[in-house]
């Protein structure tokens, strides 16, 4: 079945793991607007961020000058245990679809955390340890980030407190077990362990929780616990920076096989795997070279790019974290209990939001959950790889584009990010198999209600 000389898996050598992260902000034509202090609504300073974030990470967050930032040796050593990740040519999917398109995916699900999140978790854990901190607090939606951070904290000997969105905690009990195995303290959110959690529980005792709420709880713990700081697994500039290893490796792999993508597709929750994958390719676009067509894929149940506003908004429900200028459907919006927990965030990374606003990301597409699982199952059968529901959003669009190629006869090269494994999402697959999965798409009224709570800045 193998066409031409391209192998099924394009592996890089260990010494081809990137030695520096790519900081896309150094090349962006328009930088995104700065984060604002939630009290003063003025651009937030490094001093104001320091009770919440690690110092070196704040420096990375605010760095818009250095195009490349060297990856410290201990982080590279950890990367060597699970990277380089493979670039896979999806020959069997191509055959199933009978398409002339060449389909590739960059697979980030091959580590124990099950997703790309480990790329940033290990970096954030390293800088916390270097600063001499005792522990970290964070939130997790689907559980991937909490797991990745648990692994990082265990590796560097740090404590970790994880606020896990309540609905995910009940959907994915084994995620909790993995985190606890790595020594983390996992608390379903909203909880009665923080002021903001108690306040939200009083308003709605049956709350399913949301990422926005869990962030508020984790930030409060960091700000009020000696020797603790807060870490976040997506949205921030620093996270997209760390995730650039995905795109850098993918680009090197394409150079090795003498190919280059016409279309690059990724799922977008907070925007980190997509931002990391496309960054090094968008660099070509900035330089005026031929560059791929970029598609961001999001769930129709949480449509920040396709239906949201480009505005300053709160990053969390409790309004304790800084405000960011981003595409948002409003911080008060609580998405339905969709099974792509990692995509249930109300906003989008400021970097990606700006790139989309300026036309560097060509398109955003919202897809429905049942269509996503159709694609996930088709992919699992063809490629022998069970995808995370989040990643399957990208698969849906990759398949749709490959079918278009079948109809037009075009031999396009399609690259998509397979951000994670679906092993922890068997409950969702079970529902799908029983035909019990539903689609939930917010009405305009639903969105208008949460838009009305976006601050006028
Ligand atoms: C968290 C997660 C996502 C969404 O987060 P991004 O920051 O948008 O990448 C996507 N896929 C998987 C597997 C995840 O764990």
Image (cartoon, rainbow, N blue to C red):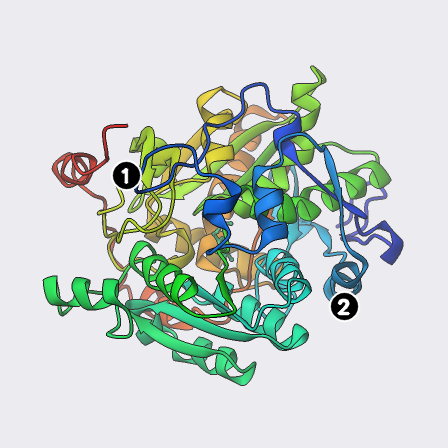
Residue 383, x across and y down, in percent: 62, 58
Residue 221, x across and y down, in percent: 38, 67
Q: Residues within 10 Å of mark 1 (few under 14, many from 20)?
A: many
Q: Is mark 2 within 8 Å of ligand 1?
A: no
Name the one closer to the observer, 232 or 387.
232
Residue 300, x across and y down, in percent: 31, 43
Q: In this figure, which residue is indicated by the disc labeled 1?
A: 329
Q: CA distance from mark 1 to mark 2?
A: 38 Å
What label sits on residue 107 in the rendered view? Answer: none
Residue 258, x across and y down, in percent: 83, 34
The quarter of the displayed image where residue 420 is located: bottom right
**Residue drawn at x 33%, y 53% as measured from the top left:** 370
Query: Considering the image in quadrants, where does the C terminus appear?
Result: top left
Name the one closer to the observer, 235 or 176.
235
Residue 296, placed above or below residue 385: above
Q: Is mark 1 within 8 Å of ligand 1?
A: no
SS category of the residue bearing label 2? helix
Q: In this figure, which residue is indicated by the disc labeled 2?
A: 81
Of labels 1 and 2, earlier in sequence is 2
């Amino acid at each position: 079945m193998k066409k031409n000389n391209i192998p099924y898996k394009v592996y890089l050598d260990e010494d081809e793991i990137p030695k520096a992260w790519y900081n896309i902000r150094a090349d962006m034509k328009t930088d995104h607007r700065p984060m604002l202090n939630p009290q003063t609504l003025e651009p937030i300073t490094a001093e104001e961020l320091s009770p919440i974030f690690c110092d070196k990470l704040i420096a990375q967050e605010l760095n818009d000058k250095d195009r490349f930032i060297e990856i410290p040796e201990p982080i590279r050593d950890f990367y060597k245990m699970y990277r380089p990740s493979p670039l896979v040519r999806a020959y069997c999917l191509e055959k199933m679809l009978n398409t002339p398109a060449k389909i590739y995916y960059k697979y980030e699900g091959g580590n124990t955390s099950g997703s790309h999140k480990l790329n940033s978790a290990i970096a954030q854990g390293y800088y916390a340890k270097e600063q001499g901190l005792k522990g970290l607090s964070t939130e997790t939606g689907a559980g991937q980030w909490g797991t990745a951070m648990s692994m990082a904290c265990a590796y560097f000997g740090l404590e970790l407190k994880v606020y896990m969105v309540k609905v995910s905690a009940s959907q994915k009990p084994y995620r909790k077990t993995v985190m606890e195995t790595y020594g983390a303290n996992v608390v379903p959110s909203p909880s009665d362990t923080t002021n903001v959690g108690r306040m939200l529980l009083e308003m709605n005792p049956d709350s399913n929780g949301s990422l926005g709420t869990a962030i508020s709880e984790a930030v409060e713990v960091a700000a009020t616990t000696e020797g603790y700081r807060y870490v976040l697994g997506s949205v921030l500039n620093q996270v997209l920076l760390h995730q650039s290893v995905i795109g850098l490796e993918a680009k090197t792999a394409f150079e090795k096989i003498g190919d280059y993508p016409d279309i690059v597709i990724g799922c977008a929750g907070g925007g980190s795997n997509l931002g990391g994958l496309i960054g090094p390719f968008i660099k070509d676009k900035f330089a005026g070279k031929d560059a791929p067509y970029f598609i961001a894929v999001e769930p129709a149940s949480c449509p920040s790019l396709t239906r949201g506003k480009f505005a300053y908004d709160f990053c969390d429900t409790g309004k304790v974290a800084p405000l960011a200028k981003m595409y948002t459907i409003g911080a008060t919006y609580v998405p339905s209990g969709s099974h792509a927990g990692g995509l249930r965030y109300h906003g989008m990374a400021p970097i990606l939001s700006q790139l989309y606003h300026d036309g560097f990301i060509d398109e955003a597409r919202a897809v429905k959950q049942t269509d996503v699982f159709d694609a996930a199952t088709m992919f699992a059968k063809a490629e022998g790889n069970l995808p995370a529901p989040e990643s399957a959003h990208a698969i849906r669009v990759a398949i749709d584009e490959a079918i278009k190629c079948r109809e037009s006869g075009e031999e396009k090269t399609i690259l998509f990010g397979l951000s994670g494994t679906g092993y922890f999402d068997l409950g969702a697959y079970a529902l799908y198999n029983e035909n019990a999965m539903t689609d939930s798409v917010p009405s305009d009224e639903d969105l208008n209600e949460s838009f009305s709570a976006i601050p006028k800045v």
